[in-house]
Amino acid sequence: MKKKLIIKIGTSTLTMGTNRISFAVIESLARQIVELKNEYEIVIVSSGAIATARQFVEIKGLNKKVESKQAMAAIGQTKLMEIYDNVFSSFGLNIAQILMTYRDFENPTAKENTKNTILKLWEANYIPIVNENDTVAVEEIVLGDNDKLSAFVAVITEANLLVLVSDIDGVFDRNPHLNADAHLITEVKDISSVLSCIEEKHSTLGTGGMASKVHAADICIKHDVEMWIVNGQRPNYIVNALNNNIPFTKFKKQ
């Protein structure tokens, strides 16, 4: 039986710090999935709808009003999926879209239906790509960048591992952007032990900082799901992390 792997990729990684979605990043993800798909059933939790829309249209007040961001997400989501479909299909990978809100996780019927849909997609050799339905829900637009959403997806699928792909190697004892002598914490078993280490770095693109990642880890640990934070700027970051060839942070139950 294949293991279950949830990969969450955020806006800052998808754009490589620019204001446009990087095809190279999605190509790298596709190549790694080709290498992993014989051993793992995979779900991708992908942000980036609003960043994608910025490449095509600008709506007045985008940076000030949530409803403008919702409109941008509605425009960008179809474009984002088109990019995924074009790139992944060139690697022989099939994708399917799942849009969710947090109400779906609070409703037992909706939660079960979502799990069954994902299982059927895996059975049909399709990779589910999950995003928050930003036109009707705003939590991840305002704060989170799908970190918590990916944790919930990992819980309902009873995943073996959730990998949060970030622009940093993991949790450091101090913010490495502000402190050159900061040290990476490679394994965390007690969430409370790293809360004092979190200092956020301002980002104009993604909304998910280290606090939201640690919150996601807390959800995972409480449901026996291991979670890693891996740097998406490193080559073959998922494959290399699975082979322990790069530094990253693991969150594991005690």
Image (cartoon, helix red, strand yellow):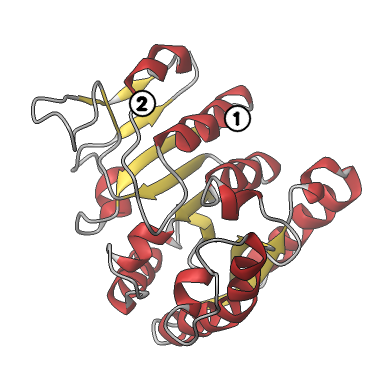
Q: Residue placed at 46% from the left, 83% from the top? A: 83
Q: Residues within 10 Å of mark 2 (few under 14, many from 20)?
A: some
Pointer 1: what residue? 219
Query: Is there any visible trace of residue 46 in the rendered image?
Result: yes
Residue 106, image quadrant: top right
Q: Position of residue 24 (x, y in %)?
A: 28, 75
For mark 2, what is the residue?
Answer: 198
In the rendered structure, which amino acid carries the disc numbered 1?
A: Ile
Residue 142 percent across, percent down from the top left: 58, 50
- Note whether 205 is above or below 68 in the view shown: above
Do we see residue 125 in this rendering?
no
The image quadrant of residue 241 is top left
Front one among 225 and 177: 177
For numbered disc 2, what is the local secondary structure?
loop
Which tag, 2 or 1, sits closer to the chain's start? Answer: 2
Q: CA distance from mark 2 to mark 1?
A: 17 Å
192 sits left or right of 154 in the view: left
Q: Answer whether labels 2 and 1 touch (C-beta < 8 Å).
A: no
The percent position of residue 165, horizontal first and vertical second, equals: 37, 50
In the rendered image, the residue lying farthest to the right is 109
Which residue corresponds to the image point at 50% horizontal and 79% vertical from the top-left? 53
Give 248 or 11, whichever is nearer the viewer: 11
Q: Is residue 217 left or right of residue 172?
A: right
Q: Is residue 216 above or below residue 241?
A: above
Amino acid type of the residue that numbered disc 2 sits on in the rendered structure: Ile
Q: Which residue is at the front of the view, 57 or 251?
A: 57
The image shows residue 31 at horizontal and vertical percentages of: 33, 70
Local SS, label 1: helix
* Furthest residue in direction left, as rendered: 180
